[in-house]
Amino acid sequence: MTNWVIELQQLSKIFETEELETHALQNISFSIAQGEYVSISGPSGCGKSTLLSILGLLDVASSGSYKLLGQDVTTLNANQAAEVRNLKIGFIFQSFNLIDELSVLDNVALPLTYQAKPPAMAEIIKRAKGCLEKVGLSHRANHKPAQLSGGQQQRVAIARALIAEPAILLVDEPTGNLDSASGDKVMQLLDELNQQGTTICMVTHDPRYADMAQRKIQLLDGELLTTPQVTTLAG
Amino acid sequence: MDLVLYRLFQTWQSLRTKPGLIFSVVVSMGLTLGALLAVSALAYVIFIKTLPFPDAERLYLVEHQLINEKQQIDGRAFTYPNLEYLYKQQQVFDKSASFYVDAGIIMSLPKRPMAEISYVTPEYFQLLNPAVALGRLISDNEGVDQYKPVAVISYRLWQQQYGGSEDVLSQSLNINDQSFQIIGVLAKLAPGLAIAGYNQQSDVYAPWDFNTVDARSRKRWGNDDGGLMMLGLLKTSITPEQANQQLTQLMNNNWQQQVSHIDFFKEWSVAAQLQPLKDYLLGDSQQAALLLFLGSIGLAIIALANLTNLLLSRTAERQHPLAISAALGASIKHIRTNVFTEIMLLMTMAMTVAQGVMLLLIALMQQYLTDYLPYLQQLHISGLSLLFSALLLVVISVVLTLICSRTIDYQALNNQLRGSGKGTGVAVKASTRHWLISSQIAIACLLLMSNSLLTTQSLNLLNQPLGYQTDNIKALVTSVPEGEGDLALLKQRLAQHPQVERLSQSMRPDIFPTLALSNQADNARFSVLAKPVDEAYFSLLEQPLLQGAMFTAQDNQQRNSVIVVNQAFADRIKTYGEVIGYTFDNGARIVGIVANTVIAGSTAQEPAFYYPAGPRRNMFLIKFHQGASLSQAAVQAIMTDVQPQLSVFSYQSLDYYNNQGWKTAMITAVSSVGISLLTALLTGVGIYGVLSYICRMRRTELGTRLAIGAKPLRLVQLMMATTRRDFLLGASCAVMALVILMWMFDGYQNIQLVSELLPIIALSLLFVGGLLVIAAYLPLRIWLKQPIAHLLKGE
């Protein structure tokens, strides 16, 4: 039996103004199974970021159904959505979105401090250090983000996304702000994480990196171009 | 707990990158809250705390009123026989005490110090119940007509003159040739009744029998004396109004019989008016404390408005990290906790500084204002003040957190990280900004206008010409009572001293007893200020003689019945005939008219007359040559040389006494100017903060305007237009509030509407308007220096 992490049915998003109605997403339906590595690609303005925001509960759909780990998350209130984001979703942004004032270690530890029942501080620090070790930056724990290169900052962001052991990593143009060498290293890291069992959904407009995913979903003008083929994994 | 500390540490890490913010908050809030806390502590002891006496709410002083034939109150002090009569006959108090406040030289001490002395009946201590450090208080056995010469001394006198020695109880002290056995020492903080100034309490308490009122005055029903007082514990069954009625009836019936043979008092009467002890002790300090309290509240409101603006801008500035936190799962509660922690941390730092400022202000008040504000020695940091500070800290932090949290759109925060950061998660509502600026302007204008008024009035008092010269003149009073020392020789020795330019054997110019004059034929009766002076008085003080002549040395020597009146008194006499030559029933004939004088701290030119002091008056005015002077020790040496019993009772310059009179006006002027400066500073910083934030938010728009050809001046006008409506609203509210406040406090009695009020309003509004212009230009200047391309990118 397939363990679905994400299940979308007829999902639409309409931006309305007094004069204009823009269909950002139309009837999107696809699913992502546990352990899958899925890329979402398409030209600029096709709705990739909107889709990722809805998947990350940063935005809500206008219609359709969205289940995360079998739970309908379309009707959650703000606090419930925050809790789901905290426990089940790991975000990696194009512009890293690290907090400049905090150290690298504190940035990585941040999600655990937002949990309703946070672990003991010693445990938080231990896990943050473990995640930094995983991305090869334990020696930079006490630095400020501004003291790191772009590639290193993105690896810190990956460590932060991993710390709460989420069900899925939502990755938004992870190499968009990086040079190609740094971008390759980040992609290699994501690949390794997937091989270790992490479910990944990545938005990218770079075909080279989109091809690295096990499955590609393409969008054009808010609609799916390709019919997603669900890869049924073992079990 | 460790997570709480971790969050605190994180917040501190974040804050320390903004030293400017920390400085602004800590300095502005620290100063204003410190001032507010110090003044609140003062207001607490003045308005709320009960007096430290048993049944304090039932303790009253009796004011004895002499009412003239026009039903006007002519005097508010007891006559000696009336006080004695009332003490024996009254039925309205459970217990009453008579006491007489005087000063004298303690001749038995080597330094012959001057001391405040209270001659009291035993009930005085029974009513006030002060603690003793040593010995006991005056008992019933030492009551009226017992003539037991004992004394209780103050803790201060014990420490300063007896070195705190317990042997003091075996010693006696000598005042006015009367020896008193010391039987007790009051405890250090024993509450007593302040006399003539809030910090001035008696050093010696002796039985009533030994009071220094002379035998003649003890029998005169018409001569009142401000040193005579009565304190009573009102019966619970009697209201103050009933007591006033009963005491008035009791006193007046007897008084009418006693003065029936004196024509001057025809149609006069006496009345009693109870004054709560608290009101007497507080005097006019209640109004001063209220004004200080309102001023510090106003400053605190301005500082709070500034802080709100700063924190709103800070929240807006932090929207990116807040958005990241939201994306990572921080709930609304987490975001609010984050904001609260930061505000709490800032306010804790500010409150710590405020405690220091409060201590400093209390120390300054205790150092310089003890004669003008009561209970200052009771002010200190107590558990209650710390609790109040903590409560204030939490309330301000919570309120500011709620205000800042209202500006956070959680959903928009979530959307902010979408793509390249579209949307704004934190935006301060325009109405909130306008409200803050308007209120800031209103309070600033009100504080500036009211403080300018106070400053103007104080300066008017300080600049009021006294009508006489004070340069290089000192007033000397000898301790030997009038008529007993060889004052003629002393006068001669002082006059011949090379340092002395001129000498007058007269009472100093700033004090006047009151005396009665009448002319039955004209049905003219006057109760006016009077001063004993010699023939050299007016020329020494350069007080101009307007008409007639000064009385002669012979007149003075023989104490002839000639007087000189001032212009104000002459104007009143004019209605009865020619002033020069006018003669009263007692034979006093007016020989001259001098110009009016005023007493320092007052603008009133009261009617007064001057009469020959005679050769035995123990008061001198000494004018020294330019740059010359004599120390008190030198004067004492001359006096001892003349006669060993003579000693200096008081010796100060006329400027010293006048400065005492001007002190209130000077303190008002200095504190008003201080509050005005702080107001201007805080308001300027606050409005700058708001406009700086608005500039940052609108930088792309400003760049666009510049790109299409707008000149910088146009942008300044644009920023000023942002606050024009707020200025008009705030200024209108301030003017209305000022009008209401003036009506409440002054009733437009002492303010010239056109010559004083309108210029002050105009200047204050102009000043705040100028602040607005500067505050609009400065933040804009920063952006105008940037390349327009950067502004267009929002950098």
Image (spheres, coloured by chain):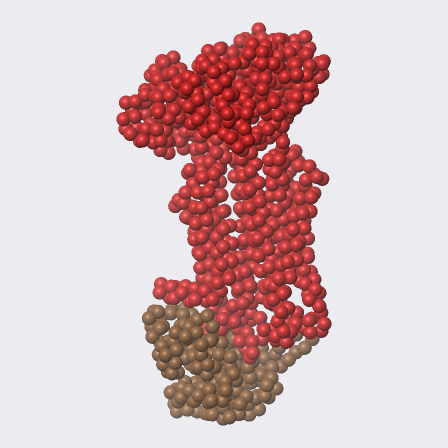
Chain colours: A brown, B red
Number of dots carrying numbers = 0
- Residue at 45%, 86% (x, y): give it: A186
Q: In which quarter of the image is residue B101?
A: top left
Q: Quadrant of residue B748?
A: top right
Residue B496 is at least partly visible in this image: yes
Foreground: A112 or A225?
A112
Check the image and name the residue furthest to the top. Answer: B261
- Residue at 58%, 66% (x, y): give it: B427
Query: On the rendered image, what quadrant is the N terminus of chain B found in?
Result: bottom left
Left or right position of B705 against B81: right
Left or right position of B696 against B115: right
Left or right position of A190 against B445: left
Residue B764 location (% of width, % of height): 65, 48
The relative height of residue B724 versus residue B280 in the rendered view (above or below) is below
Foreground: B350 or B612?
B612
Residue B73 location (% of width, % of height): 59, 21
- Residue at 47%, 28% (x, y): give it: B630
Query: On the rendered image, what quadrant is the C terminus of chain B found in?
Result: bottom right
Foreground: B247 or B623?
B623
Residue B221 location (% of width, % of height): 52, 12
Check the image and name the residue furthest to the front. Answer: B498
Residue B78 is at least partly visible in this image: no
- Residue at 47%, 73% (x, y): give it: A99
The relative height of residue B497 versus residue A11 in the rendered view (above or below) is above
